[in-house]
Amino acid sequence: MTDRVLIFDTTLRDGEQSPGATMTHAEKLEIAAMLDDMGVDIIEAGFPIASEGDFAAVAAIAKASRNATICGLSRANFKDIDRCWEAVKHAKKPRIHTFIGTSALHRAIPNLTMDQMAERIHDCVTHARNLCDDVQWSSMDATRTEWDFLKRTVEIAIKAGATTINIPDTVGYTAPVESADLIRRLIAEVEGAETVIFATHCHNDLGMATANSLAAVEGGARQIECTINGLGERAGNTALEEVVMALKVRADIMPYHSNVDSRKIMAISRRVATVSGFPVQFNKAIVGKNAFAHESGIHQDGMLKNAETFEIMRPTDVGLTETSLVMGKHSGRAALRSKLAELGFELADNQLADVFVRFKELADRKKEVFEEDLVALMRQNEAVEDRIRLKSLRVVCGTSGPQTADIVLDIDGTERTAHTTGDGPVDSAFNAVKALFDHKARLQLYQVHAVTEGTDAQATVTVRLEEDGRIATGQSADTDTVVASTKAYINALNRLIVRREKTAPDHDTKGVSYKDVGA
Ligand code: KIV
Ligand code: ZN
């Protein structure tokens, strides 16, 4: 057994599965390139059978891959596995990942007996292995599966040719000591265990995902499955940045290492937050805005004397620059380009020209432009594929109503105008959008954050919409809160349109039915 831990990133599959985290094709390609570049070993690029869009994204990521293995997910049936292979086969290093829920609760859904399920696993892994040399098998809900049956299924998968065995804690139920024991026992008792790599895949329902993943490594697992920012359904997944930094900082008690370049963490974290529409909580380990901020006098004093008093790693270890104050209205194009590159945005000349104009506009309105402002600015630059765009907005608000909005939208290339009233400026602006682009989406979340400090701070607004079970999250930022709100609303609508088009043969991508395991 080696001390190298493989990092398997599933931001683009398990992460993107979280309600509202839909990414566009171009965004997925960009994130995959960043993952490859930072040294992630395996990228789970999507669920190819789920939709034409997922298939196209996995195939494109496979074609563009450089060093990483590109993996696709498939349920336990030949149709899924074939479709997965068609997408991943373009990669230099392709992998088919097939899974089935093995616990009693999950067996009951397709109504398979233990024997029937065992046969299904054998057939599917054999079929996958006939297509691809690298096959991962996962026993969904492994941590709640009866030991004898879990052992039996793992042995069958190994005999059928699986090269990686993944033991997911699908519902975030296990605890570190149990997580280590389970892997240790599988390695000790399963026939053929020495021929495969055991993987751990933990969800964070009890906030123990990272601890459980590291404990599994202690027990002998050598692949950690994780996502950037811990993105994922419900409470999310193990966070890539946490395991990478924990292995680095506590190498004294966990003598294992990954190949990930930790200095690329901050850039990808920000990018994933932007494209997924899931902002990072301020106090999140490693990547939160406050993770390296020192407010109290005692802490600040200690930091000035010796940073190690209150920091167990340096901000630069995760790619943070020493100061977040970056630019002002006198900054030039080259400085902007280099700062954006540091933040993970590589721009072509024409893109830079456009961003530069808007940067100058912002710098005129705001005295200091912080990194967060630039990230927010870049977010607005992504509206190119959008069907609905805001051309102009004027609202009238104040103590005596009604508040009104005059809006001009470009919808599919045609300019349309509306004048509406509402209960406050945001309500009237949203009504104006709805008057021009009728839809039945329900507003699930409306959240405003100040990106930086001061009354001239940009407001970042998050809007989550739900329509027929599909959820889309939009984000935007502006020094004008009503403009930011309206843009976020439009952004969510544009994403919802993408979601409408992303429909699986018989299911929607996010709601892809795990019970449908028929071959
Ligand atoms: O959480 C889980 O069990 C999964 C499987 C599909 C691997 O994501
Ligand atoms: Zn999962």
Image: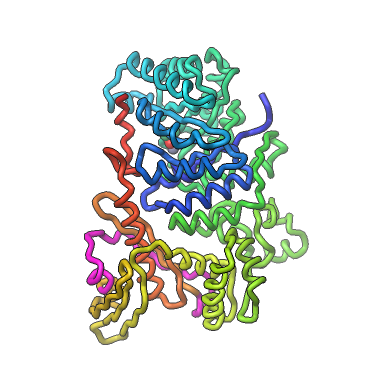
- Locate the C terminus by quadrant: top left
Q: Quadrant of ligand 1?
A: top left
Q: Assess whether residue 175 is covered by the magenta stretch.
A: no
The location of residue 418, given as percent across then percent down, is 25, 78
Is any part of residue 354 visible from this angle?
yes
In percent of the image, x 35 and y 42: which residue is there?
Answer: 51
The location of residue 447, given as percent across then percent down, is 39, 65
Q: Nearer the viewer, residue 226 or 504?
A: 504
Is any part of residue 141 visible from this angle?
no
In percent of the image, x 53 and y 19: which residue is there?
Answer: 186
Vertical side of 168 occupied by 357: above or below:
below
Vertical side of 304 occupied by 311: above or below:
above
Along the horizontal axis of the image, is 169 left or right of 101? right
In percent of the image, x 25 and y 59: which residue is there?
Answer: 441
In percent of the image, x 47 and y 24: which residue is there?
Answer: 131
The location of residue 16, given as percent across then percent down, is 43, 47
- Locate the N terminus by quadrant: top right
Along the horizontal axis of the image, is 313 left or right of 140? right
**Magenta range:** 432-457
Image quadrant where residue 415 sits: bottom left
Vertical side of 363 occupied by 37: above or below:
above
The location of residue 337, given as percent across then percent down, is 63, 67
Q: Assess whether residue 453 is covered by the magenta stretch.
A: yes
Q: Nearer the viewer, residue 254 or 61?
A: 61
